[in-house]
Amino acid sequence: MASELLRKEETLTMRRQLIGQSCRLFYSDDPVKIVRARGQYIFDENDKRYLDCISNVHHVGHCHPSVTKAATDQMELLNTNTRFLHDNLVLYADRLAATLPERLSVFYFVNSGSEANDLALRLAQQYTQHEDVIVLDHAYHGHLMSLIDISPYKFRKLNGQKEWVHVAPLPDTYRGIYKEDEPNPGLSYADTVKDLIEVVHRKGRKISAFFAESMPSVGGQIILPEGYSAKVAEYVRSAGGVFVADEVQTGFGRVGSHFWAFQMQGADFCPDIVTMGKPMGNGHPIACVVTTVEIASAFTANGVEYFNTFGGNPVSCAIGLAVLDVIEKEDLKGNAKRVGAHLKDLFTRLKSRHEIIGDVRGAGLFVGVELVEDRELRTPATKTAAQVVKRLKMEDRICVSTDGPWESVLKFKPPMCFNMEDAELVVHCIDRILTDIEANMKLEKEDI
Ligand code: PMP
C-alpha cells in the first residue's frame, strides 16, 4: 500500500488554499483521494478499490508496467529536444503513420490536446489564408484562448462568440433538429454546414476550417450519422477550407471497430488534419497533430520555425511507442469492441425496464446512457444523473461522470482493459440504483 504524506483533510485544506478554485474536483462534497492505481482500478488512502469508468487517458490501464519501464529506461539514458536527431521521434511517427490513411503523413508533436488543436488552427489558417472556423454546437476543443473561442461549451458562459467563429448544429439524432426518423440524417445535418458556409460567404468572410470531434463527447457521447463527415468535407473543401478531426478523446482503438473514430465514417472519408492527445502517453503529457504534405509545406513556407521544447522528446516517444505495443499485444482494440458491445447490450436491456433511460448509444468503450424525465418529451433528467453518479461512488465505489449540454448523459470511457465482469457490475449497480430512485419517485407522487 502506498503511504500517505498528508491526511485527507490536510490535503483538502491545502488544496483549497493553494490551488485555483476553478480547478474543480470530482465529487466536491467528498472527493476521492487516490494514492495508487493499476489497470482499471484506483485505490484510496485506505486502500479501498474503485472501478474507474472515467479515465480515458489511462488508456492501456493505470501504471501499465511496460509503459513505466519504457519511460524509466529512456529517462536513465537520455531526454532532450527535437533539435537533436533521435530515433524515437521518427520511429514513433512511423508507427502512428501505419495506423492512418496514407495522405496523413506529416507529424508535429506537442504536449496537450489544447496545444494540438491550437497548432491545427494555425496550420489551417496558414494553408487556406482564410480565418473563419465552423464548429459544432456544445463542442469543447481545449483551454487555450484560441480554443475557448471555438468551444461553444465554454464561450457561451464567457464573452460570447467571435465574428470569425460559426456554430453548426450538433448532429445528434436523439435531441437535435433531425431525429432518428429523418430519412438521411447524415445528409440533412451536413446541409446545415453548407447553409452556414453560404451565410459566412454573404458576410464577405472565408472558411479556413471545419473543426469537430469524430464523436462529440462533451456534446453528450454523440455518434455522427452515416455519411455526415464525407459530405461536410466536400462542402468545406469547395469553400477552400480544411476538415480538422479532433481525436483527442476518441482515438487509439477506443471505438473497437477502427483505430480512429473518423474511420467509422467510411473508407472514402479522410480528414485534412487530425489532432490526438489524452490516451497517447497513458497519462504522460504527449499529443500530436498529423496532416498532409501540402498543408505542412504551406506551414513551412512562411519561413518561421516551429519549436516545441518538450513535444516529441525521446522519453515521450518511448512512452508513445510502448502504448502502441500494449494496444497490439493485449488486443485492446478487440477488447473495446467485445466489452463495449456487451456493455451497450446490457444497457439496452436495462432501458426496457427503466423508463428513465431515454437513449443508449456508443461505439466500443465510448458509451453514453441518456437519462430523461419523460421519454416522449425527452426532458433531460439532470438531477437523477447526478444522483446516480454520487450513489455509484458512495455505495459501490464506481467512478462514472456525466456529459451533454444538460449533464444528463452517464458516460463510460474506461481504460481499455475494462472487462466483461466490470461491465456487468456497473450495469447491475445502476439497475439497483434506478430501481430505488423510481420507487422513491412513485412514493413521492402518491404522497402528492
Ligand atoms: N479536445 C477534446 C475533444 C478534449 O476533450 C480535450 C480535453 N478534455 C481537449 C481537446 C484538450 O486537451 P488537453 O486538456 O490535453 O489540453
Image: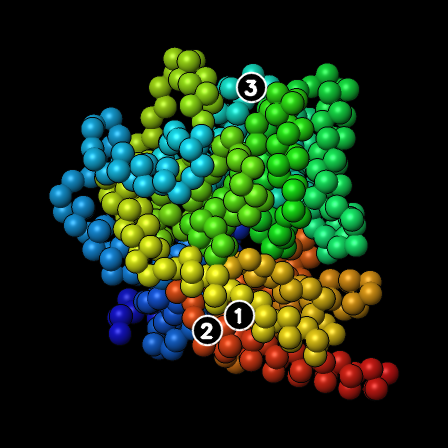
Q: Residue at x 83, y 86 (%)?
A: 447
Q: Mark 2 = which residue? A: 420
Q: Which amino acid lies under the numbered mark 2 shown in the image of this protein?
A: Met
> Which residue is most to the left?
77
Q: Mark 1 = which residue? A: 342
Ranked by sequence position, the earlier of labels 1 and 3 is 3
Instruction: Estimate the x, y position of residue 269 in percent, counting from the top left.
Output: 56, 37
User: Marks 1 and 3, Cα distance to the nearest angstrom?
Assistant: 44 Å
Q: Residue at x 69, y 64 (%)?
A: 359
User: Marks 2 and 3, Cα distance to the nearest angstrom?
Assistant: 47 Å
Q: Is residue 4 left or right of residue 444?
A: left
Q: Is residue 14 visible?
A: no
**Compared to 109, does 324 lie above or below?**
below
Query: Is mark 1 in CB contact (under 8 Å) with mark 3?
Result: no
Q: Which amino acid lies under the numbered mark 3 shown in the image of this protein?
A: Thr
Image mark for residue 85: none
Residue toward you, 345 or 391? 345
Ranked by sequence position, the earlier of labels 2 and 3 is 3
At mark 2, the secondary structure is: helix
Image mark for residue 128: 3
Label 1: how many Cα within 10 Å (few below 14, some 14–19, many 20+): some
Query: Is mark 2 in CB contact (under 8 Å) with mark 3?
Result: no
